[in-house]
Image (spheres, helix red, strand yellow):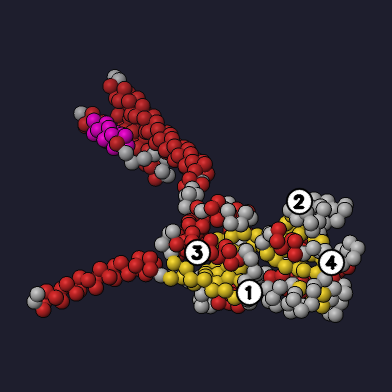
């Protein structure tokens, strides 16, 4: 092969690589997915990995015991994806790819009696609220302030192994039978009390103040060895997040794989379908929806014209009515102007009749024609008649009569 041919082939290969580099990069890209150590996040992460693998997306999983560090890593672009509980406030640089499941708050105690309220439950208790900086830890600190619990009225434990907690205050998935068996002697605390009205519970009040949480009902029988009744607690939405600069096309593919396979994913954790469904209200998300995920959710939604077809039809009908009215009015004005000129034609005919009479006064007839012409000229100047074919015919006819009158006068 000649040198010029080799250069040509090389240039062609380079062009092909440039044209297809974007697609090849997405297909071969190995994404990192970070998550916390508490279940069900590790199990869900594995399920997400296998689900995305079927769509040709490779995932490497990283685990961290510091939830706040995971969100920071996403917002700074140090990891591609993360499974986190929604923060109290939006985080610059972080966006939501898909809501996954609700993390349920389990408040369990081994205290004697039945604490009448949250403050009574906490006073004098050793409390484990998960790792410092986690969702449960932060919420507990907020509730302590809300319920006027002073520093020292309860003790926060670094871990639940060196000292047995009097109160567990943790977010997570539904407890397994093995977990509940290990919690023998503990009882679930409910934020509902006798006499509560619908929408007026302590849990509703907490959700009103802290809008990243919402009431969550654990029905009677879910944990039969921890409570005899239904328990009202709180939940936080757990989401799959990515950096705001994450590729929109890849985000579309990830969202599509997760939402389409939601039922299969829920086989590993039944609460998945509470969040991972296409009816999600993106305005309720603490972190804004990623552009590619938004495109997927809105793919079947009607366009602007379809959404506003009735309004557009109304405006079009009004427009057509206005145009038709304007045309009708224009034609009416034209007809009125024509009728006015026709009236002056009648006067010319009267003059012509007088001209043929015996002993006609040609001078008077001439003055009458000139007067009619002045009247027509005034109407033309005031735009009460149009300079159209009727006017031209009138002028021609009146001038012809004037010429005849002049000839008759000379005889």
Q: Residue at x 58, y 54 (%)?
A: 266
> Residue 24, position in %: x, y?
34, 67
Mark 4 and mark 3: span between their CA atoms? Answer: 39 Å
Label 2 or label 4, whichever comes before in sequence order: 4
Distance CA(mark 3)–CA(mark 2)? 33 Å
Is residue 197 or residue 271 the one in the foreground? 271
Give the magenta range: 390-404
Q: Is residue 101 above or below residue 159?
A: above
Quadrant (top left/top right/bottom left/bottom right) for the N terminus: bottom left
Tell which tag, 1 or 3, sits nearer the viewer: 3
Circle 1: element type: helix
Secondary element type, mark 3 = helix
Location of residue 373 by image quarter? top left
Q: Is residue 306 above or below residue 164?
A: above
Q: Which residue is mark 4?
A: 110
Residues at badges 1 and 3 in contact (C-beta under 8 Å)? no
Query: Which is in the foreground here, disc 4 or disc 3?
Result: 4
Measuring from the top left, give residue 396's x and y in whole percent: 26, 35
* In the image, farthest residue toward the right: 113
Dot 3 or dot 2, earlier in sequence: 3
Left or right: where 154 falls relative to 215? right
* Sooner in the amino-acid sequence: mark 4 or mark 3: 3
Q: Quadrant of the C terminus?
A: top left
Q: Residue at x 82, y 64 (%)?
A: 185
Mark number displayed over residue 49:
3
Of tags 1 and 4, the one toward the viewer is: 4
- Among the two numbered marks 1 and 3 on one chain, the one whose residue lies closer to the N terminus: 3
Q: CA distance from mark 1 to mark 3?
A: 20 Å
Give the Cα distance between marks 1 and 4.
28 Å
Residue at numbered disc 2:
221
Work out which residue is located at the far top of the displayed protein and give it.
Answer: 358
Residue 355, compared with residue 338, is above or below; it is: above
């Amino acid at each position: 092969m000649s040198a010029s041919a080799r250069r040509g082939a090389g240039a062609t290969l380079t062009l092909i690589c440039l044209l297809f580099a974007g697609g090849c990069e997405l297909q071969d890209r190995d994404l990192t997915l970070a998550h916390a150590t508490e279940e069900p996040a590790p199990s869900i992460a594995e399920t997400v990995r296998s689900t995305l693998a079927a769509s040709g997306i490779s995932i490497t999983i990283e685990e961290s015991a510091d939830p706040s560090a995971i969100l920071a890593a996403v917002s700074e672009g140090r990891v591609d994806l993360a499974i986190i509980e929604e923060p109290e406030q939006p985080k610059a640089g972080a966006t939501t790819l898909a809501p996954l499941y609700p993390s349920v708050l389990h408040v369990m105690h081994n205290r004697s009696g039945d604490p009448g309220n949250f403050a009574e439950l906490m006073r004098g208790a050793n409390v484990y609220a998960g790792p410092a900086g986690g969702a449960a830890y932060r919420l507990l600190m907020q509730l302590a302030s809300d319920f006027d619990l002073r520093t020292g009225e309860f003790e926060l434990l670094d871990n639940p192994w060196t000292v047995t907690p009097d109160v567990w205050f943790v977010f997570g998935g539904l407890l397994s039978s093995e977990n509940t068996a290990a919690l023998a002697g503990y009882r679930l605390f409910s934020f509902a009390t006798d006499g509560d009205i619908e929408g007026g519970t302590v849990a509703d009040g907490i959700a009103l103040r802290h809008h990243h949480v919402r009431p969550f009902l654990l029905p009677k029988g879910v944990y039969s060895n921890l409570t005899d009744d239904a328990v009202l607690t709180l939940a936080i939405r757990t989401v799959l997040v990515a950096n705001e600069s994450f590729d929109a096309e890849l985000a579309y593919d990830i969202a599509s794989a997760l939402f389409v396979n939601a039922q299969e994913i829920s086989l590993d954790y039944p609460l998945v379908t509470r969040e991972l469904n296409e009816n999600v209200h993106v305005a309720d998300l603490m972190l804004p929806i990623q552009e590619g995920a938004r495109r997927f959710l809105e793919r079947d939604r009607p366009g602007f014209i379809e959404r506003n077809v009735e309004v557009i039809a109304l405006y079009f009908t009004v427009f057509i009515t206005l145009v038709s009215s304007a045309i009708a009015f224009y034609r009416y004005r034209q007809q009125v102007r024509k009728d006015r000129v026709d009236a002056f034609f009648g006067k010319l005919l009267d003059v012509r009749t007088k001209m043929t009479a015996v002993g006609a006064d040609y001078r008077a007839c001439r003055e009458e024609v000139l007067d009619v012409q002045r009247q027509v000229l005034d109407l033309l100047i005031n735009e009460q008649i149009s300079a159209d074919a009727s006017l031209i015919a009138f002028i021609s006819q009146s001038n012809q009569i004037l010429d005849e009158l002049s000839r008759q006068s000379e005889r």
